[in-house]
Image (cartoon, coloured by chain):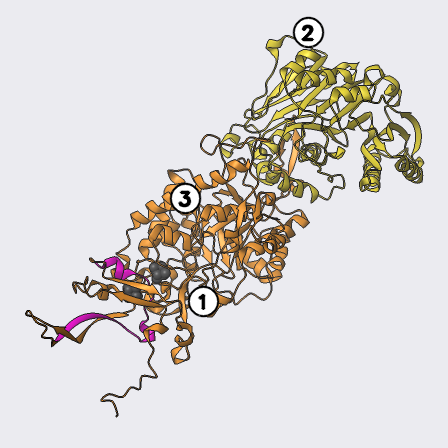
Chain colours: A orange, B yellow
Amino acid sequence: MEPATRLDHNHQLTLKDFPYIIRWRDDRCKRCGRCTAVCPMFSIEPSVILRRTIHSEGPTPQPKAVRQVVTVIKQSTDINRYCTGCGTCTLVCPNEAIEPEYNPQHKFLFHKNRGGYPYRRGGRRNDPRLSTLDRLKFTRISMLTDPALDAGRHEFRIRTYLGRILPAEELPLRFVNGRLEVDKTSGKFIPPVREIYPVMIGSMSIGALSPTMWEGLAMGVTYLNEVEGMPVVMCSGEGGMPQRLLKSRFIKYFIPQIASGYFGWDEIVRTIPHMVEDPCAIEIKYGQGAKPGDGGLLMAHKVLRLIAEIRGVPMGVDLPSPPTHQTKYSIEESVAKMIQSMSMAWGFRVPVYPKISGTRTARAVLNNLVRNPYAAALSIDGEDGGTGAAYNVSMDKMGHPIASNIRECYLDLVKQGKQNEIPLIAAGGVGKTGNLAANAAALFMLGASAVAIGKYIMQAAAGCFGDEYNRCNICNIGRCPRGIATQDPKLYRRLDPDKVAERVVEVFKAVDVELKKIFAPMGRSTELPIGMSDGISADDPAIAERLQISYAC
Amino acid sequence: MCRLVAITSKDYISPMENILALETMKEGHDGSGMGIILKNLGGEFEEMKDYPILSGICSKDGLHRLDEYMERVGFQLRHTWTPRIKPVKGIQRRDHYFARVYEYPEEYKDRAFEEKEDLLLRTRIALRRMGEDDESIIVFSFYPDIITIKEVGDPLQLSEFFGLDDSNLKAKIIFAQGRQNTNYAINLYACHPFFIQGYGSMTNGENTAFVPIREFLMSRGFPGYIGYNSDSEVFTHILHYTCKILGYPLVYYKDIITPLKTSEIDGRPDSEVVRLLKVTLRPLCIDGPNCVIGFTPDGTCFMVQDSKKLRPGVVGGVKGKYGLMSEECGLDSAIPQRDRSLDIFPMKYDMVIVRPEAEEVVVWNQLRG
Ligand code: SF4
Ligand code: SF4
């Protein structure tokens, strides 16, 4: 017999197709509606159902069917309203009545391309496996043959240099009265070098981050420098910086970034004559680990008044940056020119370095930079880097892991005897599973002079929900539930910049202690153990062989 | 921990003084090797100061090949010293121990000393390579007015083995080290003191920054920066790199191996240079516990400590004879007549420098420059 309603649901998805399924408990829910109000995806909604229950009263069973209309929380099966698993509903629920549950059998990627548009998102590479960095351990422990140092009592200098370093043979020194002095008559250019903390905050733009988030980070960084004496620096990301900061003395803790869209640079260049301090450095972005070969995009709804002002553009328009600098014909010519022009803008007092995405061609880039006396460093952003917006395929499948990329670049420098001349900055997945100090120390020992973090600080300082199971990761749509990656005042009001700043300070102080706890038993304290590859081992022979370190099991 | 005894004197002394001082410091097992470097030689070598001396050990076959090679390059043997070996239980005798004085090849005789030095270095490396695999040729130094002796065993027994007590081997500067066995495979090339082109040093300690330093030195393009069977050999090479390759005054050695904090540099009159060196030579910063005792070609001897002063070290003596040692009892044995209250225990900022001919001792302070 034909059913009363047709059972043709073939074009609909089932909840089982979705990565997160909402577990809602009828018995606990008091129908306050908070969860549905905060859900950034409108994945859940109040709904009514007709419920049939059997009741029996009296001494003998006299079952009776009762029909009731009840309100429930229903999860949408519309792919555009998929539950991201962010857990904001759980956060606001007063009765622990709702929570998303990960569904490992989901078919999300089969369906998230409606209209012929591939899946785009923010966040990180969805690969929850242990990264190479987490498979390295510190195995050279000072035991009896040499005294281990005391992390609490001994003095440790956890500092590094950012800037082109002249080899000793080229230093313009002369010998006068038993002492060396700098020969000012030689006319030799000594490039600027900054002493910084070796863990930097990597580039995250003011447009991608909310004003409260950026302000919190900036305040934290300033506090670390001014009060704690830790020279932590932070890169602006593309799109300029507020005039007030540019003209302040605090600009020396920041690294303005110039990227392919050149957003904000008219404003920066016009401000140069009014700047009271030089910035720490200038980063030229050629690539990004999360989305190699992809340009930036700031969606129109994020381009509000402040952003429009900083970037020097009208409000409410999409701001795409091309995948590559339009003038980039060759590394020999235009990259060199760009580095030189940026250096020249600040009278050669500011280190200028390029940032590229992790790639098998990194060594070629490096070798070219080695020959450019103005290139101040090379920052390599590995595949585990994060982003505000990108195609899923770029994020998940493009790019090179940072560990072997840094290692081969460093060993290349060693071959040429230039390992101390051009610092390597490693980024992309540093602290991916929370082991920030260990990952950073491992990268130093592989050859990095410094590391840069992005996602880690978002998670640690502002409670970003994102993870490698595609939790949340909607930084691209302006509806960040934490108020981190949005320009919507209703959302970013949720984030207290003072609390962010406090957390930034706590994070760096804790990392500092942990780094000491790593370096002390290894007998290292005076300089950063860059390239101390005998200190680490991998738990996998293939990794050990590739990184030219020992294997320990 | 290794025991170190360096004595510098205006008169010729016997290496036995060093050995006896080593003996007083002995604690526990100490048989993994001894090395001695004699500089500014007396006795039979006094008249041959301009001729290079090759110090080493060879098997019978090795000596044959060594002779052939030296002849091919044009070195003429002028004099040979060999120890009178007395068999001692526990010390394995090798075929030939020697210090051989050569004349430069004809075409080198009138060349500048730099060119001669270069030839000596290349020859030593070639010989080392020839005998490295089967240990048929082991050469420690090839340089004028320098003799090096190394062997595995207890220092006192070795002195008997080599007959040092009744040999006429004498010198004005003698460095000796008794090596504790923190390494299993004992390689004579791992034995301190180390020497390269007029510069020598020995260390007690552990160099935790060894790998980056070794990589840095080996990538300087200087052929002598090889070996590194011991992590302490880099201290000698850093000294050579600082003073010879870069031409810096000796005190900057301290600035390079134990750089000051940035805030400390401001107090130095040459702060601009010190700041540059700290950055430029960052990979040569040593870490871990180390007391380094060294000498330079002019006969200056010095002692420096790591930046935390984690190892012992003392300098003391009388005008005309000073000892630089790892422990005070060694000084008591070698120079008992000194005023002990004047002994210097260098701290983390100090470089104790004993001028040539043990003329005077100065303490250079890194903070003040
Ligand atoms: S977990 Fe997040 S996306 Fe999913 S229903 Fe709750 S609030 Fe909405
Ligand atoms: S909490 Fe905000 S920043 Fe974090 S993943 Fe979600 S949208 Fe992105």
- Region of the chain picked out in magenta, as a range: A67-93
The residue tagged with tag 1: helix, strand or loop?
loop
| Of the pair A162 and A277, the residue shown nearer to us | A162
CA–CA distance in space, label 2 to label 1: 81 Å
| Location of mark 1 (residue) | A321
Tell me the kind of residue under disc 2.
Gln
Few, some or many C-alpha atoms within 10 Å of disc 3 (few <14, some 14-19, many ≥20)?
Answer: many
Q: Could you tell me if the residues under marks 2 and 3 are in contact, i.e. CB atoms within 8 Å?
A: no
Give me the chain letter of mark 2.
B
Vertical order, B164 against B140 (above or below): above
Vertical relation: A545 (above or below) A198: below
Residue B358 seen in the current view? yes
Q: Are marks 3 and 1 in contact (CB under 8 Å)?
A: no
Residue located beneath label 3 in the image: A508
Q: Chain under label 1?
A: A
Q: Residue at x 67, y 14 (%)?
A: B331
